[in-house]
Image: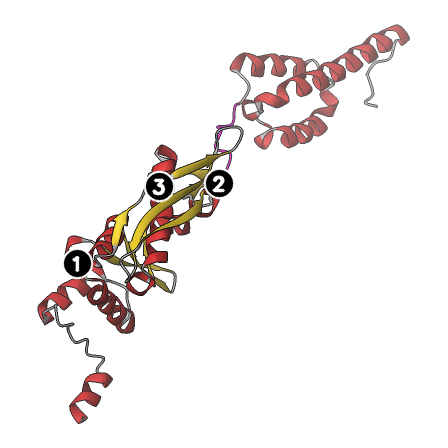
Amino acid sequence: MSNELVKHEQKDISAPSHFTPEQVDTIKNMFCKGLSDDEFKVYLYTCQRTGLDPFAKQIYAVKRGNQMTIQTGIDGYRLVADRSGKYAPGQEPVFVHDAHGKLLSATAFIKKRTNDGTWHNVPATAHFEEYVQSFNGKPAGLWLKMPRTMLAKCAEALAIRKAFPAELSGIYTKEEMEQADSVEVEVVNSKPVEYITSEQVEELTKLLSECDPSTVKNRDKWLSLKCEKGDLNKLKKECYETTLQIILDRRSEYLARLIEQKMNGDDEVKDE
């Protein structure tokens, strides 16, 4: 009893009957990095209970945050069910689409033999929106390329787990869990900024030179709001038309005052 206590305190992980200690070390180091000792024990027990082989990648543990999920593929589910001697594949899956052809659901069928020798159909339905793996709200990966196949696998997994709960409780297929890996990314507008052309810069520069020279300070302050450091080369393309019209209006006002000044015989034009 004292030896057992010492082992528990050291969190020794003993090998299940069908794994050697060396194999246990290999499994932990190669396939179960990041699992706690307790999680690894649960994983090994599940391998033993199901008879799935981690070395053949029939069963594996996935850590999402602080939660471990034990997963297999649909072939792993079929293997466990087949070993029971009470399983047979069912009819082809049935799909439901909306009026626009969008996939809504898939229903899969398997057969299970009860102890009295009677075979029963076991159906299960998977809904697309509940299982689809998405990226920014749109189907991704194989869910984009072959959605019917992926959804049918999810429905079949539901049916097999419904028929064989003792053998498969706590284990999920890869296809079922891909929705947990869906990604939502904030899309940032990466369109490059377009500036006005050199010809447009030359045009605006010429027009500015024809405006009231006494308002240069105010003009530069105004330009700094329109483009970086008042540099016309940094004026955005979409601001060109508005800026051009403002400069034309100011030039017209200045020229009108010049004409008025000459008519009145004034020596200078005062800024209004």
**Quadrant (top left, top right, bottom left, bottom right) of the C terminus:** top right
Disc 1 to disc 3, C-alpha distance: 23 Å
The residue that disc 2 covers is 137
Mark 2 and mark 1 in contact (Cβ < 8 Å)?
no
Is residue 29 visible in the rendered image? The answer is yes
Question: Mark number for residue 150?
Answer: 3
| Label 3 secondary element | helix
Q: Amino acid at mark 2?
A: Gly
* Residue at the image position 64 percent from the left and 28 percent from the top: 226
- In the rendered structure, which disc, 3 or 2, sits on the residue that comes first in sequence? 2
Instruction: From the viewer's perspective, tell me whether residue 231 is left or right of residue 53.
Output: right
Residue 189 covered by magenta stretch: yes
Q: Residue furthest bottom?
A: 2
Disc 3 to disc 2, C-alpha distance: 17 Å
The residue that disc 1 covers is 53
Residue 98 covered by magenta stretch: no
Q: Amino acid at mark 3?
A: Met
Crowd around label 2: few <14 · some 14–19 · many ≥20 (10 Å)? few
